[in-house]
Amino acid sequence: MRSMFAGSFTFACARRFPGSRLLPAFCLAALLPLASPAAAAPSCTSANGSNFNGTPIAGGDYVWFNAVLKVKGIDVSSVTTIQLVQSTISFAAGATTYLLNVPDSFITFSPTATEASTTFDGVAWNTVVPSSFAKNVFLDGLVFQVPADGLPGGINPVTWSGTFKSSAVGVTVEWQWAAAVYTQFSTDDATLGVKPVDGNQSNAYANSDHAGTPEAFKQYVSGGARGGGGSNWTGSYSGTNAVVPCEIIPE
Protein backbone atom coordinates (compact mmCIF):
# COMPACT_ATOMS: atom_id res chain seq x y z
CA MET A 1 0.00 0.00 0.00
CA ARG A 2 1.32 3.44 -0.91
CA SER A 3 1.91 5.66 2.11
CA MET A 4 0.19 9.03 2.27
CA PHE A 5 3.22 10.41 4.11
CA ALA A 6 6.48 11.76 2.73
CA GLY A 7 9.62 11.12 4.64
CA SER A 8 11.87 8.35 5.84
CA PHE A 9 10.67 5.56 8.09
CA THR A 10 12.16 3.50 10.89
CA PHE A 11 10.50 0.23 11.88
CA ALA A 12 10.29 -1.37 15.32
CA CYS A 13 9.11 -4.98 15.18
CA ALA A 14 7.95 -7.37 17.95
CA ARG A 15 7.47 -11.13 17.74
CA ARG A 16 5.04 -13.34 19.70
CA PHE A 17 6.72 -15.37 22.40
CA PRO A 18 5.20 -18.43 24.03
CA GLY A 19 2.99 -17.46 26.94
CA SER A 20 2.94 -13.80 26.01
CA ARG A 21 -0.11 -11.80 25.14
CA LEU A 22 1.54 -10.04 22.17
CA LEU A 23 -0.21 -10.28 18.89
CA PRO A 24 1.50 -12.08 16.08
CA ALA A 25 4.53 -10.29 14.70
CA PHE A 26 3.84 -6.65 14.02
CA CYS A 27 5.82 -3.55 13.20
CA LEU A 28 5.43 0.04 14.23
CA ALA A 29 6.52 2.69 11.78
CA ALA A 30 7.78 6.06 12.94
CA LEU A 31 7.72 8.84 10.41
CA LEU A 32 10.82 10.99 10.45
CA PRO A 33 10.92 14.30 8.57
CA LEU A 34 13.05 14.52 5.48
CA ALA A 35 16.29 16.38 6.06
CA SER A 36 16.18 19.90 4.67
CA PRO A 37 18.67 20.55 1.88
CA ALA A 38 21.63 22.64 2.93
CA ALA A 39 21.15 26.31 2.21
CA ALA A 40 23.25 27.61 -0.66
CA ALA A 41 26.30 29.57 0.42
CA PRO A 42 25.85 33.30 -0.17
CA SER A 43 27.72 34.70 -3.16
CA CYS A 44 29.85 37.61 -2.04
CA THR A 45 31.88 37.68 -5.26
CA SER A 46 30.91 40.41 -7.69
CA ALA A 47 31.95 40.91 -11.33
CA ASN A 48 31.39 44.32 -12.91
CA GLY A 49 31.91 44.48 -16.68
CA SER A 50 32.13 47.58 -18.85
CA ASN A 51 34.26 48.83 -21.75
CA PHE A 52 36.97 51.29 -22.80
CA ASN A 53 36.15 54.23 -25.03
CA GLY A 54 37.36 54.48 -28.63
CA THR A 55 40.65 56.28 -27.93
CA PRO A 56 43.77 54.12 -28.48
CA ILE A 57 46.28 54.11 -25.61
CA ALA A 58 49.95 54.64 -26.45
CA GLY A 59 52.61 52.19 -25.33
CA GLY A 60 54.32 53.30 -22.13
CA ASP A 61 51.30 55.26 -20.87
CA TYR A 62 49.59 54.24 -17.65
CA VAL A 63 46.02 53.18 -16.93
CA TRP A 64 44.79 54.08 -13.45
CA PHE A 65 42.01 51.64 -12.57
CA ASN A 66 40.03 52.86 -9.58
CA ALA A 67 36.82 51.82 -7.85
CA VAL A 68 34.43 53.45 -5.38
CA LEU A 69 31.70 52.18 -3.08
CA LYS A 70 28.76 53.18 -0.93
CA VAL A 71 27.63 50.96 1.92
CA LYS A 72 23.98 50.67 2.89
CA GLY A 73 22.84 49.56 6.33
CA ILE A 74 25.85 50.68 8.40
CA ASP A 75 25.40 51.20 12.12
CA VAL A 76 27.00 54.64 12.47
CA SER A 77 27.67 54.06 16.17
CA SER A 78 29.93 51.06 15.52
CA VAL A 79 33.08 50.31 13.55
CA THR A 80 32.42 48.49 10.28
CA THR A 81 35.20 47.11 8.09
CA ILE A 82 34.67 46.24 4.43
CA GLN A 83 37.25 44.14 2.58
CA LEU A 84 37.76 43.58 -1.14
CA VAL A 85 40.07 40.60 -1.69
CA GLN A 86 41.13 38.26 -4.50
CA SER A 87 40.37 41.05 -6.93
CA THR A 88 41.27 40.94 -10.65
CA ILE A 89 40.76 42.97 -13.82
CA SER A 90 40.51 41.06 -17.09
CA PHE A 91 40.30 42.05 -20.76
CA ALA A 92 41.58 40.99 -24.16
CA ALA A 93 43.32 43.08 -26.83
CA GLY A 94 44.07 41.37 -30.12
CA ALA A 95 45.52 37.95 -29.37
CA THR A 96 46.55 38.90 -25.83
CA THR A 97 44.45 38.24 -22.75
CA TYR A 98 45.26 40.26 -19.65
CA LEU A 99 44.51 39.17 -16.09
CA LEU A 100 45.67 41.84 -13.64
CA ASN A 101 45.87 41.16 -9.92
CA VAL A 102 44.57 44.07 -7.86
CA PRO A 103 45.83 44.77 -4.30
CA ASP A 104 43.52 43.87 -1.44
CA SER A 105 41.65 46.77 0.11
CA PHE A 106 40.35 47.49 3.61
CA ILE A 107 37.83 50.26 4.29
CA THR A 108 37.03 51.10 7.91
CA PHE A 109 33.94 53.14 8.75
CA SER A 110 34.66 54.56 12.19
CA PRO A 111 32.36 56.61 14.45
CA THR A 112 35.43 58.35 15.93
CA ALA A 113 37.04 59.33 12.61
CA THR A 114 36.68 63.03 11.78
CA GLU A 115 38.48 62.95 8.43
CA ALA A 116 38.86 60.32 5.71
CA SER A 117 42.28 59.08 4.61
CA THR A 118 43.69 56.54 2.15
CA THR A 119 47.15 54.99 2.40
CA PHE A 120 49.00 52.11 0.74
CA ASP A 121 51.19 49.95 2.97
CA GLY A 122 53.06 48.15 0.19
CA VAL A 123 50.58 45.29 0.06
CA ALA A 124 47.05 46.67 0.47
CA TRP A 125 45.00 49.86 0.39
CA ASN A 126 43.73 51.11 3.74
CA THR A 127 40.98 53.72 3.93
CA VAL A 128 39.42 55.16 7.07
CA VAL A 129 36.23 57.20 6.80
CA PRO A 130 33.67 58.63 9.25
CA SER A 131 30.80 56.18 9.69
CA SER A 132 28.23 58.81 8.77
CA PHE A 133 29.83 59.67 5.39
CA ALA A 134 27.28 58.91 2.65
CA LYS A 135 29.03 59.81 -0.63
CA ASN A 136 31.44 57.70 -2.72
CA VAL A 137 34.44 56.26 -0.89
CA PHE A 138 37.62 54.97 -2.56
CA LEU A 139 37.43 51.19 -2.77
CA ASP A 140 40.52 49.95 -4.64
CA GLY A 141 43.04 50.90 -7.30
CA LEU A 142 45.65 49.50 -9.69
CA VAL A 143 48.30 51.09 -11.91
CA PHE A 144 48.87 49.29 -15.22
CA GLN A 145 51.65 50.36 -17.59
CA VAL A 146 50.60 49.79 -21.20
CA PRO A 147 52.88 47.47 -23.25
CA ALA A 148 55.07 49.00 -25.96
CA ASP A 149 52.62 48.10 -28.73
CA GLY A 150 49.85 50.06 -27.03
CA LEU A 151 46.18 49.16 -26.66
CA PRO A 152 43.40 49.71 -29.19
CA GLY A 153 40.34 51.76 -28.39
CA GLY A 154 36.99 50.16 -27.73
CA ILE A 155 38.13 47.14 -25.69
CA ASN A 156 35.01 45.31 -24.54
CA PRO A 157 34.45 43.79 -22.08
CA VAL A 158 36.74 44.94 -19.29
CA THR A 159 35.70 43.14 -16.11
CA TRP A 160 36.65 43.89 -12.53
CA SER A 161 35.89 41.03 -10.12
CA GLY A 162 36.48 40.46 -6.43
CA THR A 163 35.21 39.05 -3.15
CA PHE A 164 33.60 41.36 -0.61
CA LYS A 165 33.64 40.77 3.14
CA SER A 166 32.22 42.73 6.06
CA SER A 167 32.65 42.77 9.82
CA ALA A 168 28.94 43.60 10.15
CA VAL A 169 25.93 41.65 8.92
CA GLY A 170 23.02 43.23 7.13
CA VAL A 171 24.98 45.66 4.96
CA THR A 172 24.99 45.99 1.17
CA VAL A 173 27.88 47.30 -0.92
CA GLU A 174 27.16 49.26 -4.08
CA TRP A 175 30.27 49.70 -6.21
CA GLN A 176 31.53 51.06 -9.54
CA TRP A 177 34.86 51.31 -11.27
CA ALA A 178 36.54 53.67 -13.70
CA ALA A 179 39.85 53.98 -15.57
CA ALA A 180 41.86 56.98 -16.77
CA VAL A 181 45.07 57.26 -18.82
CA TYR A 182 48.19 59.13 -17.65
CA THR A 183 51.30 59.92 -19.66
CA GLN A 184 53.40 60.00 -16.49
CA PHE A 185 52.63 58.15 -13.29
CA SER A 186 54.19 56.20 -10.46
CA THR A 187 54.13 52.49 -9.84
CA ASP A 188 54.61 53.23 -6.12
CA ASP A 189 50.99 53.45 -4.99
CA ALA A 190 52.00 55.22 -1.78
CA THR A 191 53.07 58.32 -3.75
CA LEU A 192 49.86 58.85 -5.76
CA GLY A 193 47.99 60.98 -3.24
CA VAL A 194 44.73 59.08 -3.75
CA LYS A 195 41.68 61.06 -2.67
CA PRO A 196 39.67 58.98 -0.17
CA VAL A 197 36.17 60.38 -0.71
CA ASP A 198 34.11 62.58 -3.01
CA GLY A 199 33.91 66.32 -2.48
CA ASN A 200 35.62 68.87 -0.25
CA GLN A 201 34.30 67.64 3.10
CA SER A 202 35.82 65.14 5.54
CA ASN A 203 39.18 64.86 3.73
CA ALA A 204 42.44 66.72 3.21
CA TYR A 205 41.73 67.71 -0.42
CA ALA A 206 39.54 70.81 -0.51
CA ASN A 207 38.25 70.32 -4.04
CA SER A 208 35.36 68.71 -5.91
CA ASP A 209 37.43 65.80 -7.29
CA HIS A 210 36.07 62.29 -7.21
CA ALA A 211 37.22 59.67 -4.74
CA GLY A 212 40.14 57.81 -6.31
CA THR A 213 41.68 60.88 -7.97
CA PRO A 214 45.51 60.58 -7.93
CA GLU A 215 46.06 64.14 -6.71
CA ALA A 216 49.84 64.07 -7.19
CA PHE A 217 49.61 63.31 -10.94
CA LYS A 218 46.52 65.17 -12.18
CA GLN A 219 48.53 67.28 -14.64
CA TYR A 220 49.46 64.19 -16.65
CA VAL A 221 45.94 62.91 -17.40
CA SER A 222 45.15 62.08 -21.03
CA GLY A 223 42.30 60.61 -23.06
CA GLY A 224 41.64 56.88 -23.23
CA ALA A 225 40.37 53.91 -21.20
CA ARG A 226 37.20 55.41 -19.68
CA GLY A 227 38.36 59.03 -19.58
CA GLY A 228 38.58 61.99 -21.93
CA GLY A 229 41.43 63.83 -20.26
CA GLY A 230 40.92 67.41 -19.08
CA SER A 231 39.51 67.30 -15.56
CA ASN A 232 38.30 63.70 -15.77
CA TRP A 233 41.00 62.32 -13.50
CA THR A 234 39.32 59.02 -12.62
CA GLY A 235 37.52 58.26 -15.88
CA SER A 236 33.79 57.67 -16.20
CA TYR A 237 32.14 55.10 -13.98
CA SER A 238 30.80 51.71 -14.95
CA GLY A 239 27.34 50.61 -13.97
CA THR A 240 26.67 49.97 -10.30
CA ASN A 241 26.84 46.45 -8.85
CA ALA A 242 25.22 45.62 -5.51
CA VAL A 243 26.57 42.76 -3.38
CA VAL A 244 25.93 41.46 0.14
CA PRO A 245 29.38 40.79 1.62
CA CYS A 246 30.30 37.59 3.36
CA GLU A 247 30.94 37.94 7.06
CA ILE A 248 34.56 38.33 8.14
CA ILE A 249 35.43 35.30 10.27
CA PRO A 250 37.87 36.25 13.07
CA GLU A 251 41.05 34.18 13.02
Image: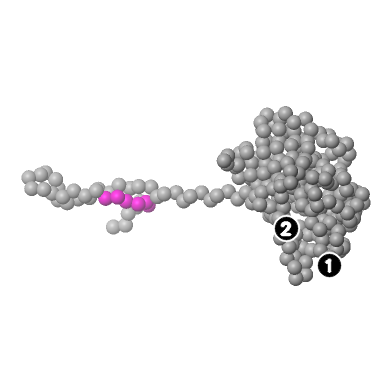
| Viewer-proximal residue among 77 and 72 | 77
Relative placement, left or right, of 38 versus 216 is: left
Q: Which residues are magenta?
A: 6-11
Q: Badge 1 local density, few (<14 within 10 Å), some, or many (20+)? A: few
| Viewer-proximal residue among 50 and 66 | 66
- Whichever of labels 2 and 1 marks the residue nearer the N terminus, that label is 2
Query: Looking at the picture, how far across and down is residue 249, in whole percent?
Result: 57, 41
Relative placement, left or right, of 126 versus 250 is: right
Distance Cα–Cα, label 2 vs label 1: 18 Å
Q: Residue at the spot x=18%, y=48% of the render?
A: 14
Quarter in which the C terminus is drawn: top right
Q: Badge 2 local density, few (<14 within 10 Å), some, or many (20+)? A: some
Q: Residue at the spot x=87%, y=63% of the render?
A: 58
Check disc 2 and report the residue beneath it: 100
Query: Looking at the picture, how far across and down is residue 78, in whole percent?
Result: 66, 31
| Viewer-proximal residue among 121 and 143 | 121
Q: Residue at the spot x=74%, y=37% of the render?
A: 128
The answer to whether one can see residue 85 in this image is: yes
Asked if the magenta segment contains residue 10, the reply would be yes
Number of numbered discs present? 2
Check disc 1 and report the residue beneath it: 149
Query: Looking at the picture, how far across and down is residue 167, in whole percent?
Result: 63, 38
As shown in the figure, which amino acid type bears the numbered disc 1? Asp
Task: Assign the magenta stretch its main secondary structure.
Answer: strand
Q: Secondary structure at mark 1?
A: loop
